[in-house]
């Protein structure tokens, strides 16, 4: 960066001191200098690598023909080109790796409601003690070591070059802790309802989390939705209405459990939107004033060594730590005094051994950890992004639906809420279809926005080629 700044300064000083250079050309060069300086500072704060000097050292541009370098006129001084290029390269994950991650994502999401059913049958599903929720949050809390690792000053950019290392600010950690408290209530409501309504209804209703998140992002983040996204939202809500109708026919407890899952899914989706806000999503920031404020924040972060935005790993770890600590305190306050009548006696009645109980709870913890990690990996690397995530979310509901109908229906583990019905199948098709429709529309909007950004932020020349006394200079930005 120092070499780049020195070379630019010397070059512009030489251009300004050329004999017979008119005043208008000086003003023109100064304007280009200011524009290039602003762009370089902006790229530097986003962690973008600088490459130079000379055309043969810079990456080959897509819009550059093979003979473009030969067609340039020769001059007494070599052409100096400064290119700002992304350093986030690296090969994409192998297709086999993507398939393994997708399979783990689907299987981990499908096993969670089934494990809750087994936990309930083992006598560990008391809704007052919430022992299973302690183990549920223990998985994400295992990545808490990421809080000890310094993070780049700009988390929103995927490119990095010798960034000044920063640590999360106290304010951002407090925000993540507050979101964790909301998620505690949401997930406790979800899995309490799952133990009452059964895994089939839980899987169908919980598939609507993506759509709930879109609605809350429209309300709180003022994010615009396309007409196809709104159609997908209404289709999902129509499927949820069918689900509620089918649960009424089974019994009051099943209907109440379904309503708990619906409320918990809505609250859990709200935590997604709040987490996006504290992680500083680029899609929620618009306008030049926001960019200027972000640059000021970045400079302050570099000076104080603190970052006001959290990475995905830090946010996941912080919320896992807070939730685990809260449930651990609850075990000492409530579960320990009521252990015999709430835990020990139901375990004896169910014939559950301590080793089997520990195995079930650890399996639930590992399943949630695997599901969280593979979810973010799928969104980032899997082809289709939100579409793939929506399809796999629907596949999870289908697998749970089929498994519970074949294994749990009519067994000691479940009653009529586990069995196949026409209304359940109809609600499954409608909800999954709405989720996939919404995901397809979301990816279409994302591709349209990215194409516009590529047109505006592609290889843009910010300094015009000037020829004077055999000197030619070109400034291009990737």
Image (spheres, grey):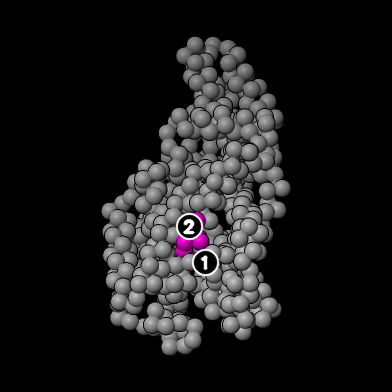
Residue linked to disc 1? 127
The image position of residue 409, as x and y in percent, is 43, 86
Of helix, strand and loop, which mostly describes the magenta segment? helix
| Crowd band around label 1 with a 10 angstrom C-alpha radius: few (<14), some (14–19), many (20+) | some
Q: CA distance from mark 1 to mark 2?
A: 14 Å
Residue 68 sits above or below residue 334 on the image: above
Q: Secondary structure at mark 1?
A: loop
Residue 440 among those drawn in magenta: no
Most foreground residue, 478 or 93: 93
- In this rendering, position of residue 63 left or right of residue 169: left
Label 2 secondary element? helix
Residue at 62% across / 29% down in the picture? 300
Residue 347: mark: none
Nearest the viewer among 261 and 452 is: 261
Packing grade of label 2 (10 A; few <14, some 14-19, many >=20) is: many
Q: Nearer the viewer, residue 166 or 250?
A: 250
When asked about the image quadrant of residue 341, the answer is bottom right
Q: Circle 2 sits on which residue?
A: 186
Count the marks: 2
Q: Residue shown at 38%/58% (left/top)?
A: 211
Please name the residue shown 64% across and 22% down the image.
9
Q: Which residues are magenta?
A: 185-191
* Residue 449 pos. (x, y %): 40, 47
Residue 71 visible? The answer is yes
Is residue 187 inside the magenta stretch? yes
Is 352 on the left-hand or right-hand side of 236?
A: right
């Amino acid at each position: 960066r120092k070499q780049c700044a020195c070379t630019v300064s010397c070059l512009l000083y030489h251009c300004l001191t050329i004999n017979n250079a008119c005043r208008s050309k000086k003003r023109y060069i100064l304007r280009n200098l200011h524009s290039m300086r602003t762009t370089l500072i902006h790229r530097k704060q986003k962690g973008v690598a600088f490459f130079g000097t000379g055309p043969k050292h810079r990456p080959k541009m897509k819009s550059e023909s093979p003979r473009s370098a030969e067609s340039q006129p020769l001059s007494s001084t070599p052409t100096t080109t400064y290119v700002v290029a992304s350093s986030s390269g690296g090969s994409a994950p192998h297709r086999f790796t993507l398939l393994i991650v997708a399979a783990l994502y689907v299987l981990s999401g499908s096993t969670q409601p089934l494990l809750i059913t087994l936990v309930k049958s083992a006598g560990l599903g008391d809704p007052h003690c919430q022992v299973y929720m302690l183990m549920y949050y223990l998985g994400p809390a295992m990545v808490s070591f990421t809080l000890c690792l310094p993070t780049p000053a700009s988390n929103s950019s995927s490119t990095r070059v010798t960034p000044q290392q920063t640590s999360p600010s106290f304010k951002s950690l407090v925000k993540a802790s507050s979101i964790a408290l909301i998620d505690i209530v949401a997930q406790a409501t979800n899995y309490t309802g799952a133990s009452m309504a059964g895994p089939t209804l839980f899987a169908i209703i919980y598939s609507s989390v993506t759509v709930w998140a879109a609605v809350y992002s429209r309300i709180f983040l003022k994010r615009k939705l396309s007409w196809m996204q709104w159609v997908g939202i209404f289709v999902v809500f129509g499927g949820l209405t069918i689900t509620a109708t089918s649960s009424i026919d089974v019994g009051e407890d099943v209907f109440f459990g379904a309503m708990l899952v619906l409320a918990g899914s809505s609250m859990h989706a709200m935590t997604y939107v709040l987490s996006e806000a504290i992680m500083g999503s680029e899609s929620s920031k618009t306008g030049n004033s926001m960019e200027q404020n972000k640059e000021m924040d970045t400079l302050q972060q570099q000076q104080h060594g603190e970052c006001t935005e959290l990475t995905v790993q830090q946010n996941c770890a912080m919320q896992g730590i807070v939730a685990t600590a809260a449930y651990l305190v609850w075990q000492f306050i409530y579960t320990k005094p009521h252990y015999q009548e709430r835990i020990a006696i139901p375990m004896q009645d169910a014939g559950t051994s301590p080793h089997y109980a520990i195995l079930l709870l650890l399996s639930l913890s590992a399943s949630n950890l695997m599901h969280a990690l593979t979810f973010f990996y799928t969104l980032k690397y899997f082809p289709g992004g939100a579409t793939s995530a929506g399809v796999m979310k629907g596949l999870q509901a289908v697998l749970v639906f089929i498994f519970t109908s074949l294994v749990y229906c009519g067994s000691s583990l479940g009653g009529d809420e586990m069995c196949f019905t026409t209304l359940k199948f109809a609600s499954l098709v409608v909800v999954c279809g709405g989720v996939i429709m919404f995901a397809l529309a979301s990816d279409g909007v994302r591709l349209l926005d990215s194409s516009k950004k590529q047109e505006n932020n592609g290889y843009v020349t910010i300094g015009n080629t000037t020829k004077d006394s055999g000197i030619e200079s070109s400034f291009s930005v990737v």
